[in-house]
Image (tube, helix red, strand yellow):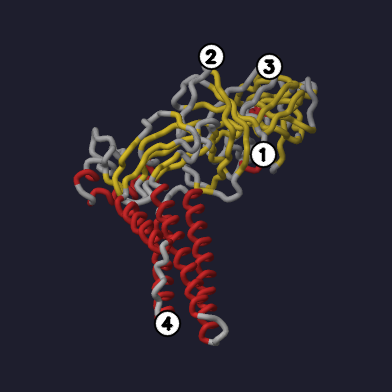
Amino acid sequence: MCGAVRTVHPAGRHRVACVSAKPPRTLVLAAAGLFLVSSTAASCNDEQTDVRLGEAARGTVSEIVEAPGSVTARAAATVSAPAAGTLDDLRVESGQRVGKGQVLAVIDAPDLEARRRSAERALDQASRGGSSSIGGTSGFTAVRRKTDKQAADAFKEARDAAAKITDPALREVLLKQVDAARQQYDAASAAAGAALRSVQQGVASLGEAVSSLSAAQRLQAQQAYELADAAVEALTLRAPVAGVVQLGGTSSASTPALSDLLAQGPLAASGPGSALPGVDESVPRGGYVAAGTPILTVVDVSKLGLTAEVDETDVLLVKAGVKATVELDAATGASYQATVRAIDLLPTTSSRGGVSYKVRLDLAAGKDADGEAAPTPRPGMSAVVRLQVREADNAVTVPASAIINVDGKDTVWTVRGDSYERVPVTLGVQGEDVVQVTDGLDAGQRIAVAGADEIRPGDKTS
């Protein structure tokens, strides 16, 4: 037989006790066999009270820790505008499945396009020999300083543009590209400076120095174009992960970034961030976007999980690999299976105000009340997670109501002849209705299974 399941306040389950209550446990489930064999009345201060007798039995006891939780996706990546402009092309719709690297949208950013055209013209000029008329060492120095400033400006613009990209992988690639280009140019500029010093020392000709400076100029122009081109290429937004598209950002990420759009003109005020009832907040085609505006989110639902908030009084019982059953508020009657993957080391403040720890689980398929496949959950759905932290098979079991605590010791009333005898016991796995006795009692012994706190030393069984 299985004991009923019920939710218990974090303060714990209070067992029937003669002197003090049993220490708390968040929630437990018990399954064991117990056969009630008789009912009698014990005398206590000349008053008749019901005491039920039964036997210690053998069975299985499971200890369950219950915790609130929510369904989680494997990953979610928000794709944002890398620069100010307009949403020129949107190639996907909400709910559409996409593959990693698939083109999702294109941003039109006139400023970046203009910077690339300017860099292309400068590269063309440098390739045709833009430093042919330097005119002496003073002119050489002036040209070198101008080239260094152009390089510094190009690197700053490229770094600023890369820093606005929200995709961490793409941002890191572009920033590394900027750093590598700067190191290459610094080396070329240093070589031009060394060539000038050789001229001043009379060990090299001015023509050799000019050649070195021309090489630095061409490198600077080439790098400026490549960085500007990379910034324009980043305007083509690709899926960072495979998954399902949701237009706009997540609720936590999109609100701060989109609120600024209200001041950006009519297109912005009627699009994202408007928060008007009945108006789609996603960015429409042709809509204005600021740098960092969320365009869409790709959610990887290939593998669903759970996070559960486990109270500090129970978390030490939870280990990786522990099995759990899950019920969703949105799927009445359905039951899902889950397995603990990891337990966070640092705590959080639980919804009940105490200290709790996040337990992360892998979620498996479920079944409904008819045994059919349960609906596939959505990320964020509320759940009740029941973690089976301990189990004892073929154990000596007694009802929890048979345990009384005297002077800090767990005891039961056993039947000896026609009298009751109090026997200390050691408890193992503790279920809500049935507990395991590891020492002090054998299966088959007659005990008081109810009304045990009414019995006094010397009372007779009949």
Q: Sequence-wise, which precedes: disc 4 or disc 3?
A: 3
Q: Sequence-wise, which precedes: disc 2 or disc 4?
A: 4
Q: Sequence-wise, which precedes: disc 3 or disc 2?
A: 3
* The image quarter in which residue 317 lies: top right
Q: Amino acid under label 2?
A: Glu
Residue position marked by numbered label 2 in the rendering = 372
Alpha carbon distance from label 3 to label 2:
37 Å
Are the residues tagged 4 and 3 within 8 Å (C-beta)? no
User: Is residue 124 shown left or right of residue 346?
Assistant: left
Nearer the camera: disc 1 or disc 2: 2
- Residue 454 can be seen in this image: no
Q: Sequence-wise, which precedes: disc 1 or disc 3?
A: 3
Are the residues tagged 1 and 2 within 8 Å (C-beta)? no
Residue position marked by numbered label 1 in the rendering = 319
Q: Is residue 363 above or below residue 150?
A: above
Q: Amino acid under label 1?
A: Lys
* The image quarter in which residue 137 lies: bottom left
